[in-house]
Image (spheres, rainbow, N blue to C red):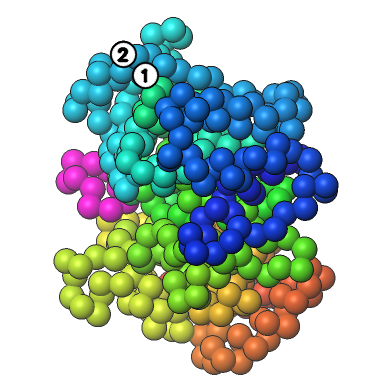
Amino acid sequence: MHISCLSIILLISQEQSPKKKASKFDARKQPSPAPISNRTTALAAESEKTRDKYITETTTATRKETGNGNGNGNIQAQTFTFRDLASATKNFRPDCLLGEGGFGRVYKGRLQSTGQLVAVKQLDRNGLQGNREFLVEVLMLSLLHHPNLVNLIGYCADGDQRLLVYEFMARGSLEDHLLDIPLDQKPLNWHTRMKIAHGAAKGLEYLHDKANPPVIYRDLKSPNILLDRDFNPKLSDFGLAKLSPVGDNVHVSSRVMGTYGYCAPEYARTGQLTVKSDVYSFGVVMLEIITGRRAIDTSRPMHEQNLTTWAQPMFKDQKRFPELVDPLLRGEYPGRALNQAVAVAAMCLQEDPLVRPMMADVVMALNVLATGCEDNVGRSSPSFRLSLQNEEQIQEQQMTDYDSDAERRHAVAQAIRWGSSNSRNSKHLQT
C-alpha cells in the first residue's frame, strides 16, 4: 500500500524549536496545498472558526491524496459534534472514565446513532501542543490501517474542543492485565503474553516497513497496547508519532518525548530518532511481559527500580533466566520458549542501535511462541544471537550481520543452529 503523508510531513516538521527555521521542502515533488506548514504553526492563534475549517480541509485533502477514501486502508473518519459525544459518554460522567494521561482523558461511550460502543479521548484544550497532537493522530490513523493498530472512527473539532473516537477495546490495556493486578483477577498465561507480544511487534513492523514513508511510533509502552475481547493487541495513541527519515538521512532530530523507562538511550541523549528507537521500547515492553514488572518502579529497592538495568546482568547467564519470570505464572511456562523470549528482549535492548534487530526479525522470532509450538523453538523459528559469555565479541559480529538484508538472513540461519544446540543443552530449564 502506498501512503502519501505530505500533510503529516509538514505538520510534524514544525515540532522544532521556535528559533529554528522549518526545514525546506520541495513542493514540486509531492504537490499539496502549500500553506499547510505555515498554518500549522499559527494554529493556536487562529480563531476557532478558522481552526475548525483548517482541520476539516487538512483531513479532507489528505484523504484525497490517498484516493478519496477508496482502496486499501483509506477509510474516511466521521465527524462528530461535541453534543454527540457528550451524549455518548453521559456528559463525560466520572463512571465512564477509562483512564487519563498527559494529553487528556478517555471515556467509554455509546453512539446514539448506531449503538456502537466507543472510546472517546478528550484532549487537553490548552495550547498549540494539544492541537498538534490532535492533528497528528487524526492524520496518522486516517492513513494507517492494520489489524494491530487501533481503529479511528471519527473526531470532533467543535470550538476549542478536540476529541477522538476509537473502537472500544473490551480488555483495556496490557498494563491493566500485567502490572499490579487485583488479587481476584486471573493473570495472563504464558501463551497469551506471547500472543500479545507478537501482535504488538506486527503493528510496529507495519509502521516501520509497510507504511510509506515509514512511521516511528515513539511512545510504545504497556498502557498504549490495547486488548480486544480475545486479547488481540492494538497500538494506540499516535499523537507523538513521527515520519522516519528517508533517502540519505539516517535519523530525524526531535525534541525528546515519550515515557521515561521506555526511551532508547541514544534518543534520550541526542534527540536523534530512528526506527531502532522503537525497537528498544519494544524490548522494554517484552521484559514487562516476561517479568510482570514496571519499566520504572520506585517502590522497589534502588537496584531494582529500573527494569532494564535490573535484568541486563541476567541476560549473560541462561541459568538465571527463570529469575526474570513473573511469579504469577507459578512456573507454568516452557523453558525453551523462555530462552527465546529473553533472547528477543535482550537483542532489542542492545545499547548500540545498529545491532538491534529490525521489527520484521522480531516478528519472525515471536511467531512460534505466539502459536504455541514451543517444541519447534530454536529449530524452525529464527532466534537472535545472544552471547552468554562474551558480549563485546557478539556485538562486533552482529554489526556485520545486520549491514544488509542478505547478511541478516545469514545471521538468522546461524542463530537457528545456535538455538537448536542451546535448547538441547538446557533441558534443566524446561517444565
Q: Is residue 91 magenta?
A: no
What residue is pinned by disc 2?
87
In the rendered image, residue 183 lying in the magenta stretch gets the answer yes
Q: Residue tagged by mark 1? A: 82
Question: Which image quadrant is residue 24 in?
Answer: bottom right
Closer-to-camera residue (202/49): 49
Q: Secondary structure at mark 2?
A: helix
Q: Where does residue 387 sit, x and y in percent of width and height?
A: 55, 84
Above or below, 41 against 375 in this view is above
| Above/below status of 105 relative to 18 | above
In the rendered structure, which amino acid carries the disc numbered 1?
A: Phe
Tell me where residue 394 appears, x and y as whole percent: 61, 87
Q: Secondary structure at mark 1?
A: helix
Q: CA distance from mark 1 to mark 2?
A: 9 Å
Magenta range: 178-190
Residue 345, percent across and down? 49, 68
Depicted 251 relative to depicted 89: above or below = below
